């Protein structure tokens, strides 16, 4: 289970600040555009779009924004050509990093990502250099409300097809195989559960504990810069950093 609660806490922390909302909505809007391009604008027949809509709702994106993003994507498919590109490399301290991007200009994005790695003492590698250290999974984080029965939630999640459930103080972190994610999410949604997040993600098989304050500072600066980059959708890493542990306490 290593890395699950850290992943969730990072996600929740990013989502708390209102100032971050616009940026998050813009990133989700790009995911909607990709989903519409790949499978059309009707979520009833486009499973990928249904998954992105669930992610949008978990991030408190208003329904009107979601509908507008779908309509915009359907109308602009001929004008904007987004593509998904993954970058891999190392941060200071040998921490493995995966950066997922959605871009309409791959040269600009490659240059920006490389600059951030170089500026902060990291090194951008080739495809496959670190991704083998991570597992692709579905992650559904269910809000833990007063009176919820642990065993009942775990049983419902496992019956729905989940591969694992990790019980946290304020949530249940439900892991699925990528192929089972949509079905599990939809079953739990119908059962009335509220999601703090629901998306496909990557979790490290093992973590790299980094304690040197100077190295930690460089890593945090690098992660912040990547997160601020418009083309970056998600950043995954295998670092076990002191700040993350503090957030869990």
Image (cartoon, rainbow, N blue to C red):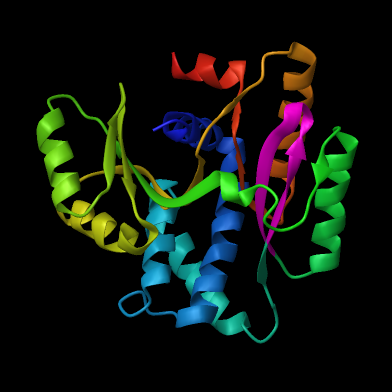
> Does residue 93 belong to the magenta stretch?
yes
> Is residue 40 in view?
no
For this rendering, which residue is in front, 227 or 92?
A: 92
Is 111 above or below relative to 171? below
> Is residue 187 in view?
yes
Q: Quadrant of residue 94?
A: top right
Q: Is the magenta region chiefly helix, strand or loop?
A: strand
Is 90 above or below relative to 86? above
Is 5 above or below relative to 180? above
Q: Residue at x 42, y 54 (%)?
A: 55
- Counting from the top left corner in percent of width and height, residue 2 is at 44, 30
Is 46 above or below relative to 52? below
Q: Residue at x 89, y 40 (%)?
A: 118
Q: Quadrant of residue 186?
A: bottom left
Q: Residue at x 19, y 57 (%)?
A: 187
- Counting from the top left corner in percent of width and height, residue 156 is at 13, 45
- Counting from the top left corner in percent of width and height, residue 90 is at 75, 39
Q: Residue at x 52, y 17 (%)?
A: 245
Where does the N terminus fall, quadrant-wise?
Answer: top left
> Does residue 185 belong to the magenta stretch?
no
Horizontal arrangement in the rendering, residue 48 relative to residue 163 (left or right): right
**Residue projecting furthest to the bottom:** 78
Horizontal arrangement in the rendering, residue 52 relative to residue 234 (left or right): left
- Which stretch is magenta? 86-102
Q: Number of callouts in the render?
A: 0
- Counting from the top left corner in percent of width and height, residue 88 is at 71, 50
């Amino acid at each position: 289970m290593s890395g699950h609660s850290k992943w969730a806490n990072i996600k929740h922390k990013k989502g708390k600040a209102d100032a971050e909302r616009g940026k998050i909505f813009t990133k989700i809007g790009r995911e909607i555009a990709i989903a519409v391009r790949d499978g059309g604008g009707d979520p009833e027949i486009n499973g990928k779009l249904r998954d992105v809509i669930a992610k949008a709702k978990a991030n408190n994106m208003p329904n009107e924004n979601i509908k507008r993003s779908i309509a915009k994507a359907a109308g602009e498919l001929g004008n904007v050509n987004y593509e998904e590109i993954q970058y891999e490399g190392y941060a200071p301290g040998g921490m493995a990093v995966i950066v997922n991007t959605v871009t309409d200009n791959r040269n600009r994005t490659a240059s920006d990502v490389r600059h951030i790695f170089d500026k902060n003492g990291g090194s951008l590698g080739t495809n496959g250099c670190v991704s083998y250290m991570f597992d692709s999974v579905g992650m559904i984080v269910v809000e833990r409300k007063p009176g919820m029965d642990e065993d009942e939630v775990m049983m419902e999640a496992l019956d729905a097809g989940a591969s694992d459930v990790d019980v946290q103080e304020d949530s249940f972190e439900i892991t699925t195989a990528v192929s089972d994610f949509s079905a599990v999410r939809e079953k739990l949604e119908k059962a009335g559960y509220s999601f703090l997040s629901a998306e496909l993600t990557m979790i490290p098989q093992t973590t790299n504990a980094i304690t040197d304050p100077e190295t930690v500072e460089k890593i945090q600066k690098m992660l912040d810069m990547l997160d601020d980059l418009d083309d970056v959708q998600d950043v995954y890493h295998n670092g076990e950093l002191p700040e993350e542990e503090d957030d869990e306490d």
